[in-house]
Amino acid sequence: MDRALAREAHDLLRSARAWIEEWAEEGVNAFPIAGVATPAEGEPAVASAAAEDLERVRAELGECTRCGLCEKRSTIVFGDGNPEADLMFVGEGPGEQEDRTGLPFVGRAGELLTRMIERGIEMPRADVYICNIVKCRPPGNRNPLPDEVAACRPFLDGQIEAIRPKVIVTLGKPAASLLLGRDVAITRVRGTWHEYRGIPVMPTFHPAYILRQYTEENRRLVWEDLKAAHTRSRES
Ligand code: URA
Protein backbone atom coordinates (compact mmCIF):
# COMPACT_ATOMS: atom_id res chain seq x y z
CA MET A 1 0.00 0.00 0.00
CA ASP A 2 1.10 3.52 -0.76
CA ARG A 3 2.88 4.93 2.36
CA ALA A 4 0.87 8.19 2.41
CA LEU A 5 -2.41 6.27 2.16
CA ALA A 6 -1.35 3.89 4.92
CA ARG A 7 -0.49 6.87 7.15
CA GLU A 8 -3.90 8.47 6.44
CA ALA A 9 -5.74 5.24 7.24
CA HIS A 10 -3.75 4.86 10.45
CA ASP A 11 -4.58 8.44 11.55
CA LEU A 12 -8.24 8.01 10.72
CA LEU A 13 -8.46 4.81 12.74
CA ARG A 14 -6.69 6.46 15.65
CA SER A 15 -9.10 9.40 15.75
CA ALA A 16 -12.13 7.08 15.31
CA ARG A 17 -10.94 5.07 18.30
CA ALA A 18 -10.43 8.29 20.32
CA TRP A 19 -14.00 9.45 19.50
CA ILE A 20 -15.49 6.07 20.44
CA GLU A 21 -13.60 6.06 23.76
CA GLU A 22 -14.76 9.61 24.48
CA TRP A 23 -18.42 8.76 23.66
CA ALA A 24 -18.20 5.60 25.79
CA GLU A 25 -16.97 7.71 28.73
CA GLU A 26 -20.04 9.93 28.24
CA GLY A 27 -22.27 6.84 28.35
CA VAL A 28 -23.10 6.68 24.61
CA ASN A 29 -23.30 3.01 23.62
CA ALA A 30 -25.57 2.98 20.55
CA PHE A 31 -26.23 5.07 17.46
CA PRO A 32 -29.40 5.35 15.40
CA ILE A 33 -29.16 3.79 11.95
CA ALA A 34 -30.38 6.05 9.14
CA GLY A 35 -34.00 5.21 8.26
CA VAL A 36 -34.58 3.12 11.38
CA ALA A 37 -36.54 4.85 14.11
CA THR A 38 -35.27 4.22 17.64
CA PRO A 39 -37.61 4.91 20.56
CA ALA A 40 -36.76 7.93 22.74
CA GLU A 41 -35.33 7.10 26.15
CA GLY A 42 -38.00 5.70 28.46
CA GLU A 43 -40.43 5.11 25.60
CA PRO A 44 -41.47 1.54 24.78
CA ALA A 45 -40.24 0.06 21.48
CA VAL A 46 -42.75 0.33 18.62
CA ALA A 47 -44.94 -2.80 18.47
CA SER A 48 -44.98 -4.81 15.26
CA ALA A 49 -48.09 -4.82 13.06
CA ALA A 50 -48.79 -8.39 14.19
CA ALA A 51 -48.54 -7.42 17.86
CA GLU A 52 -50.86 -4.47 17.29
CA ASP A 53 -53.35 -6.66 15.43
CA LEU A 54 -53.25 -9.20 18.26
CA GLU A 55 -53.87 -6.45 20.78
CA ARG A 56 -56.89 -5.34 18.77
CA VAL A 57 -58.27 -8.91 18.83
CA ARG A 58 -57.68 -9.07 22.59
CA ALA A 59 -59.40 -5.71 23.07
CA GLU A 60 -62.38 -6.87 21.01
CA LEU A 61 -62.66 -9.98 23.20
CA GLY A 62 -62.78 -7.74 26.29
CA GLU A 63 -64.23 -9.27 29.46
CA CYS A 64 -66.16 -11.71 27.29
CA THR A 65 -69.65 -12.95 28.24
CA ARG A 66 -70.53 -14.40 24.82
CA CYS A 67 -71.03 -17.94 26.16
CA GLY A 68 -71.69 -19.77 29.42
CA LEU A 69 -67.98 -20.44 30.09
CA CYS A 70 -67.66 -16.89 31.46
CA GLU A 71 -69.72 -17.85 34.52
CA LYS A 72 -67.16 -20.20 36.06
CA ARG A 73 -63.88 -18.90 34.69
CA SER A 74 -61.41 -16.93 36.80
CA THR A 75 -59.30 -15.53 33.95
CA ILE A 76 -59.51 -15.36 30.19
CA VAL A 77 -56.57 -17.26 28.66
CA PHE A 78 -56.03 -15.45 25.39
CA GLY A 79 -52.66 -16.75 24.19
CA ASP A 80 -48.96 -16.50 24.79
CA GLY A 81 -45.81 -16.13 22.74
CA ASN A 82 -44.30 -14.35 19.81
CA PRO A 83 -46.74 -12.38 17.60
CA GLU A 84 -44.25 -12.93 14.74
CA ALA A 85 -44.09 -16.69 15.29
CA ASP A 86 -43.63 -19.05 12.35
CA LEU A 87 -45.16 -21.88 14.40
CA MET A 88 -48.51 -21.63 16.16
CA PHE A 89 -49.92 -24.30 18.50
CA VAL A 90 -53.68 -24.53 19.03
CA GLY A 91 -55.01 -26.57 21.94
CA GLU A 92 -58.47 -27.21 23.30
CA GLY A 93 -59.16 -24.98 26.29
CA PRO A 94 -57.57 -23.78 29.52
CA GLY A 95 -57.29 -26.15 32.49
CA GLU A 96 -57.20 -25.28 36.17
CA GLN A 97 -53.72 -23.77 36.28
CA GLU A 98 -54.25 -21.86 33.06
CA ASP A 99 -57.51 -20.45 34.46
CA ARG A 100 -55.60 -19.29 37.53
CA THR A 101 -52.60 -17.79 35.75
CA GLY A 102 -54.12 -16.52 32.50
CA LEU A 103 -51.45 -18.38 30.48
CA PRO A 104 -52.04 -21.33 28.14
CA PHE A 105 -50.37 -24.70 28.72
CA VAL A 106 -48.72 -24.12 32.08
CA GLY A 107 -50.05 -27.23 33.90
CA ARG A 108 -48.71 -30.78 33.49
CA ALA A 109 -49.74 -31.00 29.84
CA GLY A 110 -48.18 -27.58 29.34
CA GLU A 111 -44.91 -28.69 30.87
CA LEU A 112 -44.80 -31.58 28.43
CA LEU A 113 -45.64 -29.29 25.51
CA THR A 114 -42.89 -26.90 26.59
CA ARG A 115 -40.41 -29.81 26.77
CA MET A 116 -41.53 -31.00 23.33
CA ILE A 117 -40.88 -27.53 21.91
CA GLU A 118 -37.66 -26.74 23.76
CA ARG A 119 -35.98 -30.16 23.72
CA GLY A 120 -37.67 -31.68 20.69
CA ILE A 121 -37.45 -28.94 18.10
CA GLU A 122 -34.95 -26.93 20.13
CA MET A 123 -36.78 -23.63 20.08
CA PRO A 124 -37.46 -21.39 23.06
CA ARG A 125 -41.17 -21.60 23.91
CA ALA A 126 -41.26 -17.80 23.70
CA ASP A 127 -40.51 -18.02 19.95
CA VAL A 128 -43.75 -19.84 19.11
CA TYR A 129 -47.35 -18.77 19.75
CA ILE A 130 -49.70 -20.92 21.83
CA CYS A 131 -53.45 -20.58 22.28
CA ASN A 132 -56.66 -22.60 22.48
CA ILE A 133 -59.93 -22.90 20.57
CA VAL A 134 -61.78 -21.58 23.64
CA LYS A 135 -60.31 -18.92 25.88
CA CYS A 136 -62.15 -19.84 29.11
CA ARG A 137 -61.91 -23.03 31.15
CA PRO A 138 -64.68 -25.56 30.55
CA PRO A 139 -65.82 -26.66 34.05
CA GLY A 140 -64.14 -29.89 35.18
CA ASN A 141 -62.01 -29.79 32.00
CA ARG A 142 -64.86 -31.19 29.90
CA ASN A 143 -64.65 -30.76 26.12
CA PRO A 144 -65.93 -27.36 24.99
CA LEU A 145 -69.49 -27.47 23.61
CA PRO A 146 -70.21 -26.50 19.99
CA ASP A 147 -71.82 -23.16 20.94
CA GLU A 148 -68.79 -22.30 23.11
CA VAL A 149 -66.38 -23.13 20.28
CA ALA A 150 -68.50 -21.11 17.84
CA ALA A 151 -68.58 -18.07 20.15
CA CYS A 152 -64.79 -18.11 20.50
CA ARG A 153 -63.97 -18.89 16.89
CA PRO A 154 -63.76 -15.29 15.60
CA PHE A 155 -61.04 -14.64 18.18
CA LEU A 156 -59.00 -17.70 17.18
CA ASP A 157 -59.40 -16.63 13.55
CA GLY A 158 -58.31 -13.12 14.56
CA GLN A 159 -55.19 -14.53 16.22
CA ILE A 160 -54.38 -16.63 13.16
CA GLU A 161 -54.84 -13.66 10.83
CA ALA A 162 -52.75 -11.37 13.06
CA ILE A 163 -49.84 -13.82 13.30
CA ARG A 164 -50.14 -15.51 9.88
CA PRO A 165 -47.82 -18.32 11.05
CA LYS A 166 -46.10 -20.51 8.48
CA VAL A 167 -47.47 -23.66 10.15
CA ILE A 168 -50.26 -24.37 12.66
CA VAL A 169 -49.97 -27.44 14.90
CA THR A 170 -53.31 -28.55 16.35
CA LEU A 171 -53.18 -30.46 19.63
CA GLY A 172 -55.86 -33.11 20.04
CA LYS A 173 -59.16 -33.90 18.38
CA PRO A 174 -61.26 -30.77 19.09
CA ALA A 175 -58.65 -28.36 17.66
CA ALA A 176 -58.02 -30.60 14.63
CA SER A 177 -61.77 -31.02 14.00
CA LEU A 178 -62.33 -27.27 14.15
CA LEU A 179 -59.57 -26.32 11.72
CA LEU A 180 -60.17 -29.26 9.37
CA GLY A 181 -63.89 -28.44 9.29
CA ARG A 182 -65.14 -31.92 10.16
CA ASP A 183 -65.27 -34.39 13.01
CA VAL A 184 -61.92 -36.19 12.76
CA ALA A 185 -60.34 -39.22 14.41
CA ILE A 186 -57.04 -37.87 15.65
CA THR A 187 -55.27 -41.21 15.15
CA ARG A 188 -56.21 -41.01 11.44
CA VAL A 189 -55.30 -37.38 10.72
CA ARG A 190 -52.23 -36.87 12.87
CA GLY A 191 -49.03 -36.68 10.92
CA THR A 192 -50.78 -35.60 7.69
CA TRP A 193 -50.86 -32.14 6.15
CA HIS A 194 -54.01 -30.03 5.88
CA GLU A 195 -54.70 -26.36 5.33
CA TYR A 196 -56.62 -23.60 7.10
CA ARG A 197 -57.01 -20.20 5.46
CA GLY A 198 -54.03 -21.00 3.24
CA ILE A 199 -51.82 -22.01 6.18
CA PRO A 200 -50.44 -25.58 6.43
CA VAL A 201 -51.89 -27.45 9.42
CA MET A 202 -50.28 -30.44 11.14
CA PRO A 203 -52.57 -32.21 13.63
CA THR A 204 -50.93 -34.14 16.43
CA PHE A 205 -51.88 -35.72 19.75
CA HIS A 206 -52.74 -33.50 22.71
CA PRO A 207 -49.95 -33.58 25.33
CA ALA A 208 -52.54 -34.58 27.98
CA TYR A 209 -53.22 -37.73 25.92
CA ILE A 210 -49.48 -38.45 25.74
CA LEU A 211 -49.31 -38.11 29.54
CA ARG A 212 -52.12 -40.66 29.87
CA GLN A 213 -50.66 -43.01 27.24
CA TYR A 214 -46.96 -42.44 27.84
CA THR A 215 -45.72 -45.03 25.39
CA GLU A 216 -42.57 -44.89 23.32
CA GLU A 217 -44.68 -45.20 20.17
CA ASN A 218 -46.89 -42.18 21.01
CA ARG A 219 -43.88 -40.06 21.92
CA ARG A 220 -42.19 -41.03 18.65
CA LEU A 221 -45.29 -40.09 16.63
CA VAL A 222 -45.61 -36.66 18.25
CA TRP A 223 -41.90 -36.08 17.79
CA GLU A 224 -42.23 -36.89 14.06
CA ASP A 225 -45.20 -34.51 13.71
CA LEU A 226 -43.38 -31.67 15.43
CA LYS A 227 -40.24 -32.24 13.39
CA ALA A 228 -42.27 -32.13 10.15
CA ALA A 229 -44.03 -28.94 11.29
CA HIS A 230 -40.78 -27.29 12.30
CA THR A 231 -39.05 -28.23 9.03
CA ARG A 232 -41.94 -26.91 6.95
CA SER A 233 -42.05 -23.67 8.93
CA ARG A 234 -38.44 -23.03 7.91
CA GLU A 235 -38.94 -23.77 4.23
CA SER A 236 -40.23 -20.44 2.94
N1 URA B 1 -54.97 -28.09 27.67
C1 URA B 1 -55.28 -27.28 26.64
O1 URA B 1 -55.85 -27.71 25.64
N2 URA B 1 -54.95 -26.02 26.73
C2 URA B 1 -54.31 -25.50 27.77
O2 URA B 1 -54.03 -24.32 27.77
C3 URA B 1 -53.98 -26.38 28.82
C4 URA B 1 -54.31 -27.66 28.75
Image (cartoon, rainbow, N blue to C red):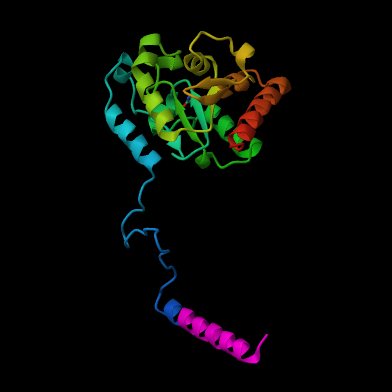
* Nearer-the-camera pick, 173 or 233: 233
Residue located 37% across and 42% down the image:
49
Q: Is residue 103 left or right of residue 229?
A: left
Instruction: Answer whether residue 89 is magenta in the image.
Output: no
* Nearer-the-camera pick, 17 or 35: 35
* Nearer-the-camera pick, 91 or 35: 35
* Nearer-the-camera pick, 115 or 49: 49
Residue 52 coordinates in the image, percent (x, y): 34, 40
Looking at the image, the residue that sits furthest to the right is: 216
- Say above or below: 144 vs 224: above
Residue located 63% across and 13% down the image:
187
Residue located 44% across and 34% down the image:
163
Quadrant that contains the N terminus: bottom right
- Say above or below: 37 vs 159: below
Residue 126 coordinates in the image, percent (x, y): 50, 41
State the extent of the magenta-drawn residues as a range: 1-21
Q: In this view, does 5 lie to the left or right of 139?
A: right
- Say above or below: 12 vs 59: below
Quadrant that contains the C terminus: top right
Q: Toward which corner of the image does residue 124 lie, by quadrant?
A: top right
The rendered magenta stretch, by its main secondary structure, is classed as: helix
